[in-house]
Image: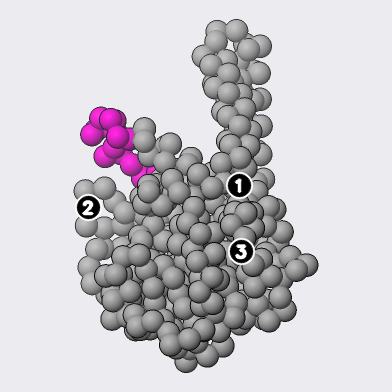
Amino acid sequence: MRTALVVGTGLIGTSVALALSARGVRVHLEDHDPDQPKTAAALGAGTDEPPAGAVDLAVVAVPPAHIARTLAALQRRGAARGYVDVGSVKGGPRRELADLGGDLDSYLGTHPMSGKERSGPLAATADLFEGRPWVLTPTPGTDTEVLNLALELVALCRAVPVVMDADAHDRAVALVSHTPQLVSSLVAARLEDAAESAVRLSGQGLRDVTRVAASDPRMWLDILSTNPGPVADVLAALAGDLDEAVRSLRALESADEAKRDVGFAGVEDLLRRGRAGQDRVPGKHGAAPAAYETVAVHISDRPGELARIFADAGSAGVNVEDVRIEHATGQQAGLVQLMVEPTAAPGLIAALRQRGWPIRQ
């Protein structure tokens, strides 16, 4: 691949362009908002000048509802040898492109499983996709050259290709991406009119649950409107669990011991199934989740403190497998949770204490 056209210079499109440009591909940038390609070009993502002729690959990075029409227009003008999109819904755009008379053989639907709460070109980074799954949804009719170009795109962005059926992909993202977004928004919505005294008690658990609720509502409305059926199916199953949870909790209020026993059993079953499901979420490098030991360290909110604690852990010969930070409400301090191999935890605790770090048991 020597040349590419990226249509849509938001977070994903600009990140793709930055990655390709960094690896020697000449990238042309296009967007319905003329200011966004200029911003992306200034970041080093390519040029906002139109290509002189057909490029090797056109990457469509527009909202799902606009993918098919954008692809059809590009194909009519002969913009590229091959066409891919990077939207989060795959089945609907393919069927709509067929209805518009588009060429399905020169098109391959893809979806990089990466993103941020922030949007726009200024949030883009060349390493956004590194090590992340990138779904490809070829069909028996997909041109081999287009498949090879798509695989090259994934390789240049240093992602991991995953081949799936388009509709299977849509059902999967409904479960692992689209429904979590809605559930996060539902929980966060409870805070809108909550008392300030309650909100001030917020801890890391609430921050974790509501993090993605900060995403752009307009973007998610577009995504959800193109994958409503699979998302509704997951939500319906979730609603059944919620109804059962409500009945179980109400039973715990009863003075009848038998009813309370039923309530305990219902809540326990929900918590058990939740833990079993969470255990299936892939861990580091996509492998099965590992049982790490957590070393909790009190840390002040001063420049260089995080760098110092990581350096001290490295000096102790310990690899930090994962890290979380819990901020203390109203204080210039927090709790850093260092996840390490269980056998490494005692040595790390001793080394950090020797260097003056306060360890929380």
Distance (Cα) linking label 1 and label 3: 30 Å
Mark 1 vs 2, N-terminal side: 1
The magenta span reads 191-208
The mark nearer the N terminus, 1 or 3, is: 3
Pick whichever of labels 2 and 3 is earlier in the sequence.
3
Q: Secondary structure at mark 3?
A: loop
**Looking at the picture, does residue 46 appear above or below residue 122?**
below
Dot 1: what SS? helix
Residue 242: x and y, percent? 56, 28
Outermost right residue: 140
Figure check: 24 above or below 47: below
Q: Measure the alpha-carbon separation of dots 2 and 3.
A: 58 Å
User: Disc number at residue 175?
Assistant: 1
* Residue type, numbered disc 1: Leu
How many C-alpha atoms fall within 10 Å of the one at disc 3: few (<14), some, or many (≥20)? many
Mark 1–mark 2 distance (CA, rounded to whole Å): 37 Å
Q: Secondary structure at mark 2?
A: loop
Q: Which mark is residue 331?
A: 2
Whole-percent x, y for residue 239 in the image: 58, 29
Q: Nearer the viewer, residue 321 or 78?
A: 78
Q: Residue at x 35, y 60 (%)?
A: 118
* Magenta stretch holds residue 103: no
Residue 236 appears anywhere in the view: yes
Q: Position of residue 219 (x, y in %)?
A: 41, 52
- Report if the CB atoms under discs 2 and 3 are less than 8 Å apart: no
Name the residue beneath numbered marker 3: 102
Q: Quadrant of the C terminus?
A: bottom left
Going by the numbered disc 2, the residue's amino acid type is Gln
Of labels 2 and 3, the one closer to you: 3
Which residue is depicted at the point 26% across and 63% down?
300
Quarter of the figure with the N terminus? bottom right
Q: Comparing marks 1 and 2, which lies closer to the viewer?
A: 1
